[in-house]
Image: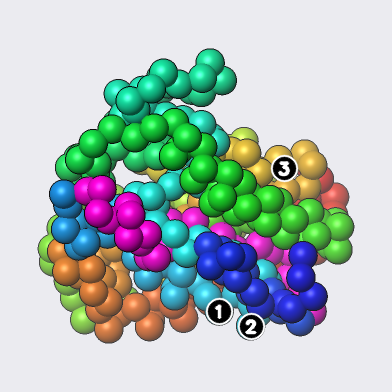
Amino acid sequence: MTGDPNYIIKGKIDVKRPLKQALPLVVSSPHSGRNYPQKFVDASDLTPLRLRSSEDSFVDEIFDSAPTLGAPFIKALFPRAFLDVNRQPFELDPSMFSDILPNFVTTQNSRISAGLGTIARVVSNGEKIYRDKLTFIEAETRINNFYWPYHQTLKTLIDDTKNEFGYCILLDCHSMPSGTNKYKNSCRSSTGSLGDIVLGDCYGTSCHRDIINSAIDILSGYGFSVRRNIPYAGGFITRNYGKPKEGVHAIQIELNRSLYMDEKLIERLDNIELLAKAMTNFMGFLGNLLTSNDLAAE
């Protein structure tokens, strides 16, 4: 780790750390990156706007107050359509490649079948990303240059936090499509059956029950409709790092996009400022939630 609390790793990962960490909290935004390599754009027949449809657009802006509260914040600068760090390192669809994949590669699971492996085959509405097949060396290069640095940095932030406080809460930040185009001039919006926010704790395995229940209570108290684990229980980051018995509690948060953006145009709504303030309060609440290491280690 560099001595500078704020730094960018090779233009791929942005890390902001407070001068002195005050909260046992790490905040991650793995899908809000929007630096699209030109070679990647040229390899697709999709328009730049369609390529952006897989982004968790503006989620990094909503949570970027974490360092002012005393918590480190990490975000990917590269887009999810290019490489998804919320997957195992080698979840690849063999139909995308011109050569035979090595035996260590995972080639079959529900995410790969949906076209959403570590290297995605499609964007959010199912449109195919690539005009031609890729080579395995291209996938391996992306994973080595983007995937591993993100996870190595995230793990360091978690380990440093746990060493400092005895425990760590990881908040992994995402957004979900609303399925509606109705917007209102407030932080609350017409969010349909999904509700406003989904919190995922991998069905109780990635986070202590008292933490997730308190998180639901505080967000509900702000006026949001909150669901737990349905339809998003948590991705690889939540599953991989959430180890409550070891003092690391991981929560995935999904924000309904109709709360803060025009999903068709990928543009911010005025509501985004209200939502960001609410999430600032929420992060402060999470960071001050635990007062006992006994609870953290249960």
Q: Earlier in the sequence, mark 3 or mark 2?
A: 2
Left or right position of 153 against 34: right
Circle 2 residue = 68
Residue at horizontal 23 percent and vertical 74 percent from the top: 267
> Secondary structure under badge 1?
loop
Left or right position of 138 against 45: right
Identified by mark 2, the residue type is: Thr
Residue found at the far top of this picture: 103
Point out the stretch of residues depicted in magenta.
20-44
- The spot of residue 274 in percent (x, y) is 38, 81
Q: Which one is in front, 241 or 231?
A: 241
Residue at horizontal 29 percent and vertical 63 percent from the top: 257
Q: Could you tell me what secondary structure mostly forms the magenta stretch?
A: loop
Circle 3 residue = 244
Q: Quadrant of residue 168?
A: bottom right
> Secondary structure under badge 2?
helix
Is residue 4 at least partly visible in the picture? yes
**Can residue 146 be found in the magenta stretch?**
no
Circle 1 residue = 65
Left or right position of 91 against 231: right
Is residue 188 at least partly visible in the picture? no
Residue at horizontal 23 percent and vertical 68 percent from the top: 266
Disc 3 residue crowd, few under 14, some 14–19, many 20+, Cα 10 Å: many
Identified by mark 1, the residue type is: Ser
